[in-house]
Image (cartoon, helix red, strand yellow):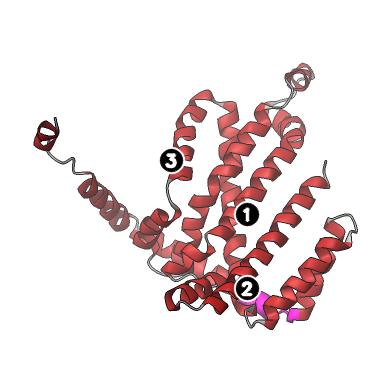
Amino acid sequence: MSQLLDLIPTIPVAEGAEIVMDWLTDTFAGLFGVIKESGKFSMEFVTDFLVSIPPFLFILIIGVLAFFATKRKFGLAIFSIVGLLFIYNQGLWEELMNTITLVLFASILAVIIGIPLGILMSKSKMAEATIQPILDFMQTMPGFVYLIPSVAFFGIGVVPGVFASIIFALPPVVRFTNLGIRQVPKELVEAADSYGSTGWQKLYKVELPIARSTIMAGVNQTVLLSLSMVVIASMIGAPGIGRNVLSALQQANVGNGFVAGLSLVILAIIFDRLTQSFNKKHD
């Protein structure tokens, strides 16, 4: 049996992928260049703005935001202040600002793309049947693989890191948006129809408000997945704390790696609790 299998010629999948990638990079080189330069400028501008804010003022703002976001509870506010002070004390403040910029851009763009896709899936069975396998593919593909097209399209730097993060973090917000809208009680949809609501009115006044909690859960997961790509994105030149983790790994420096990893954990907890609290405020 194995001999018969050996007689079958190798399917040229790799060669086909190379041809497709070369065609894309050659055909859309101008577009990719514009995206890279504009994205780099925008992210550097945001990072410079964040760095220009005095660290203690920034920490105070986050603490106050956490205090009011959690309905005037001190737990998250104290944790945020102590955690950010720790990161500042370890000399990782500028790296923290770069990381926040990367996560913000990747998360915002993923949400902007993901929510309309989720709405489309909820309204069309054909769209759901088409997009669902793509989302399955995106979620099962290892994150490192996304670095290949990112580098091919945009080279090395923060923009390909954001591009890879968007692809990796996109599926949850799409799935949760689709799920949330499909779970809206049919009685409410029929009531909106009976009052003569248009499709857009029904979506914005009935379906999206009711599905908001589910959609926000997807946004929460998207933000955390964007943050989880920080270390991987550092392999293609994205700045931030991930680069410190990668450097510590390459040099087998346990101490620096532990500090950088702990800083990412602190940031992840702050992002997670803040996005969850914004969701609870509307429950």
Q: Quadrant of residue 178?
A: top right
Check the image and report above or below for 247 versus 70.
below
Who's the residue at 48% across and 27% down the image?
129
Q: Amino acid at mark 3?
A: Phe
Task: Identify the magenta region.
Answer: 45-55
> Label 3 to label 1, Cα distance in Å?
20 Å
- Residue 108 seen anywhere in this rendered image of the structure: no
Residue 234 drawn in magenta: no
Is 125 on the left or on the right of 179, as rendered?
left
Query: Which residue is drawn at the image coordinates 41% and 57% (left, top)?
Result: 144
| Residue 168 in sight here | yes
Disc number placed over residue 265 in the picture, else none: none
State the residue in front, 180 or 241: 241
Q: Which of the pair 148/257 is nearer the observer?
A: 257
Considering the numbered disc 3 on the image, is that residue within a helix, a strand or a loop? helix
Please report whichever mark, 2 or 1, sits nearer to the chain's N-terminal start: 2
Residue positioned 63% across, 69% down in the render: 262
Q: Which mark is residue 223?
A: 1
Q: Which residue is mark 2?
A: 96
> Gap between marks 3 and 2, in whole Å?
31 Å
Disc 3: which residue:
137
